[in-house]
Image: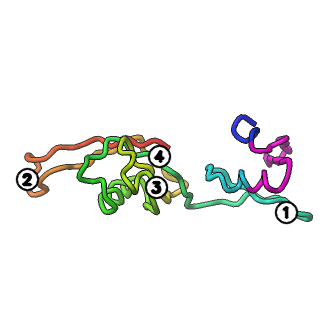
Amino acid sequence: MRIWGNRGLLEVLANKKGFYFFKFSDDKACSNVLDAGRMVILKKWHPRLILSKDSYSKILIWVKLFNIPHEYWNEEGLSHIASAVGKPLYADSLTESMKRISFARVCIEIDASCDLVDSFYLFMGDSSNPKLGENVEILVEY
């Protein structure tokens, strides 16, 4: 209700099998929530709907990547960094246009059974001589 109440959500119901039902003021309100981009899996109700919980081996998730070195702020560099978390799919418009460089926001595909990483290290420097490089910690927020 806190997130969707101002978008036309009227009521949230639950049954004993662990299914939740969201009642909206109208079809437009429901469509707005479905299109909002939140990480929620919803099915639109219809008569004779069979309630079943699908299992997903892969999920799409938006991540924020912090502390990215300036030389990695391009499509290839961001893709390389995001691939440490999952399979990069696309970045948001502010990331692509570099109008916000405090963090990069990237949609990635991850294995649903894997643990989420909070950070990882990016080696910067000469790979033939590790003493000439440094590790930069990239922070990840989901």
Amino acid type assigned to the residue bearing label 3 in the image: Ser
Which residues, given as a range, are shown in magenta?
7-31
Which label number is shown at residue 129?
Answer: 2
CA gap between label 1 and label 3 equals 38 Å
Residue closest to the eye, 96 or 55: 96
CA gap between label 1 and label 4 equals 32 Å
Counting other residues with Cα less than 10 Å from the Cα at mark 4, is it few (<14), some (14-19), or many (20 or more)? some
Amino acid type assigned to the residue bearing label 2 in the image: Asn
Of helix, strand and loop, which one carries label 3? helix
CA gap between label 1 and label 2 equals 60 Å
Q: In which quarter of the image is residue 101?
A: top left
Amino acid type assigned to the residue bearing label 4 in the image: Leu
**1 or 2: tag closer to the N-terminus:** 1
Which residue matches tag 3?
Answer: 93
Of helix, strand and loop, which one carries label 1? loop
Residue 52: % across, % down: 78, 59
How many numbered marks, from 0 up? 4
Counting other residues with Cα less than 10 Å from the Cα at mark 2, is it few (<14), some (14-19), or many (20 or more)? few
Counting other residues with Cα less than 10 Å from the Cα at mark 3, is it few (<14), some (14-19), or many (20 or more)? few
1 and 3 marks in contact (CB < 8 Å): no
Residue closest to the eye, 122 or 33: 33
